[in-house]
Amino acid sequence: MSDTGVTLPIHEVEDRILAAIREDGALVLSAPTGSGKTTQVPQMLLHSGVVGRILVLQPRRLAARVVAHRVAEELGGTVGDVVGFQTRHERHIGEATRIVFLTEGLFLRQLLADPELKGVGAVVLDEFHERSLAVDLTLGLCRQLRRAGRRDLRLVVMSATLDVEAVSGYLDCPAVQADGRTFDVDVQYDDMDAATPVWERAAACLRRWLDGGDQGDVLMFLPGAYEIRRTVEACRRRLRPDDEPITVLPLHGNLPPAAQDRAVRPASGPGASRRVIVSTNVAETSITIDGIRCVIDAGLARVQRYDPSRAVNALLVERISQASAQQRAGRAGRTAPGVCLRLWSAADAHARPERDTPEVERVDLAEAVLQLCAFGIDAAEFGWLDPPPLARLQQARSLLDDLGAIDATGTLTEAGRIMVDVPAHPRLGRMLLEGSRRGVADRASLWAALIAERDICIRPVAARYRTPAETGWPSDVGAREAAYEAARASRFDGKRCAELGLHAGTCRDVERASNQFRRITGTLQGPGRRRSAVADAELARCVLVGYADHVALRRTQPGGVDHQDVSDSRSCEMEGRRRVVLDRNTVVGNHGVLVAVEVREVEASRAEGGGVHTVASLATAVDPEWMQELFPDRVEARVELVWDETEAAVMEVEALHFGALALQPVRRVPRDRAAAGQMLAARVAAGLLRFDSWNAAAEAWLARSRCVADWFPERGLLLYDDDDLAILYSEIVGDATRWNAVRRAPVLEPLRHAMSWAGQQFVEQMAPERLRLPGGQGMKITYTPGEPPRGRARIQDLYDLTETPRIAAGRVPVLLEILAPNFRPAQVTDDLAGFWERTYPELRKELSRRYPKHEWR
């Protein structure tokens, strides 16, 4: 029984939980949604006499804060007393605090600062099924810590849908299974027209629920803030004047805490309205929203994936797993029997993956590898629950090496040790270090915060902050800085932020993050914040140092990558010839070289043609000369021959190459004309160019020659294979560099003359173009290598020809298409004698009736 006197399903296994903790020190707990594990297990540990603090890890800030308030209330106190919580920007912990709810990433920071976890008696990993990269690291590090001597450290891993056998085997500890939730949930499926927007489908389900007269609040799951906003609007439109009071509320991580609290806490007092809460998956786990009787689940979530082969992040809407669907349905059975309406079919439900893909298999690993290096652990030898592919670990190490965070042995450098302390991606740590070196650390901290936090913009940056005159150097980050400073001057007043198109809550997060970065780099706010073109250029260099592999070239810049005129001026090329599209709201103008902080795949709207596009955003203009200044070992001067599609010519390009990207290319007529001619000939050989005179006669000569070479291998005739033709094309092209200079060159005679005179005569004799028939007509013979030669003739033209004609000195029979008077094939045969004897008599009867004016023998 809990401190509130309420008995929950988890209490039925309390004795087994505490026995496992006493005897083994570690436990895997599988308890269905609504069983009370999140709020009750920490209290069980507290009352059992665990020495030290009990740290309860939550996947989200919202859950850490809400659950802490709930447990503190159950224990008869307030947050900051016995129960506290800590997120990146909030800390409510006192000296007497015993239970601390905190986010997974923050726990890793604490572990880095204190690898022995002094003063900590227990670590609880809640909602482990989500398998974030941070929680996988935490699990492995806690297991290692317990094996290294902290056997007194209690470790509990719990979830409603985790793989109990795998985790208990990994920890070599017992597992406890709790029984079902308090009340049943009736799961129903509704696979209405998928072409209807998901928000309209969700709102239609809500209307049907309300019309059914059911009571209680409703929780809807949508994939993101955009879909939530559209769903809230659609639901409000469907409410009627005669409905009882209903409040439709959004819930997602980008809302201010007060708005989140309003959504998760039930309305109280006389006349309190029913709630319809429209949420992302933040409401899927941990937090309890009392009063929910109906869940409407779109079955979708936005999932972050990283493609290491292209260094591209993808944030795509995907179908949730069966485990997530089970978690969501459980929200409806907390306090009474409920209903879950799923916007997909029962067949689709069974086709979904059983569990979510662990983040270790789908996100960038650089930060995790850096943190393991700080512990002195080789990521390839770390005890992962599910080891990531070795190639992905190697790519993460390669990036850390490029950033100067590790040396060739994988050991942290002095810069790397500082970067570990930065609670953000190592790229931003490197950016902060460069800012300190260049004397712009204060503003670099702000730029890093603008990159690390959610985008402060809820619409494109206002025009006055987009021009270089205001930003000093063309940069999307700089434009956001200018808008942010205007909001900061108003102390992030909500109305002023809305006028600026900024999210006030996110601006405050940026303020806190930038101050945190300043503390790490040892800078203070002051005169260094003053904007200038020189300082902005230094900041642009800082971005370049952190994101050097994200340099992009405009494909439409004069003398650019391929000088190809494309209609979309936002088209860019990145390392590895990756084609990306610059974000339409960028402020970098027509600058030819830039660096993009984000390179991600996004789903295009129907108006944009649909599909998935690779978009480069948060771009900053770059001076190409900076490459040689900052990366002298990665810049190489090269002279290359390239094909210019617009000019239809081979051009010589002299440029500084940063990887595969040509910076400030200079184009001119090739000086080595022979090599240029070889490139032009190679394009002909590859089928990319075709001579105007390459006609049916040329094709026929090749076919005849190849057939004869096949029929008479002992003659050693020219095969006209790819190598032979490549030599021939080179002879035709010579040292020409422009296609127009040679495209009309004759090809039949060079083709024939490539073979000896005797060979040509032999081909003419063995594979004639035509055969003379008894009546004097000529029958054209067509040749295809590997197939019999074919001839076409009317029946009347074949009279007096009793045997199948043969060529190649009698070696090869001709396959005859015998035509009726209407010139349609009546028979195809290579046995003319058999045709006359067996087929022709019946055929003649039929055809003579249809064509009586023709000769019939």
Image (cartoon, grey):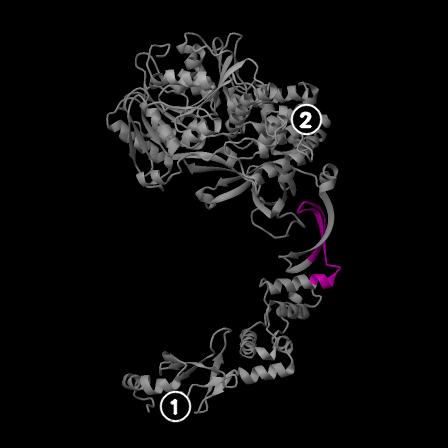
> Residue under circle 1?
799
**As drawn, which residue projects farthest toward the left?**
213
| Structural crowding at the residue carrying mark 2, measured as other residues with C-alpha within 10 Å and reported as few (<14), some (14–19) or many (≥20) | some
Q: In this view of the protein, which residue sits in the foreground, 171 or 542?
A: 171
Residue 531, numbered label: 2
State which quarter of the image contains the C terminus: bottom left
Amino acid type, residue under disc 2 in the picture: Arg
Amino acid type, residue under disc 1 in the picture: Tyr
Q: Secondary structure at mark 1?
A: loop
Residue 661 covered by magenta stretch: yes
Q: Which stretch appears magenta?
A: 651-676
Q: In this view of the protein, which residue sits in the foreground, 301 or 506?
A: 301
State which quarter of the image contains the N terminus: top left
| Structural crowding at the residue carrying mark 1, measured as other residues with C-alpha within 10 Å and reported as few (<14), some (14–19) or many (≥20) | some
Count of numbered labels shown in the rendering: 2
Q: In this view of the protein, which residue sits in the foreground, 173 or 390?
A: 173
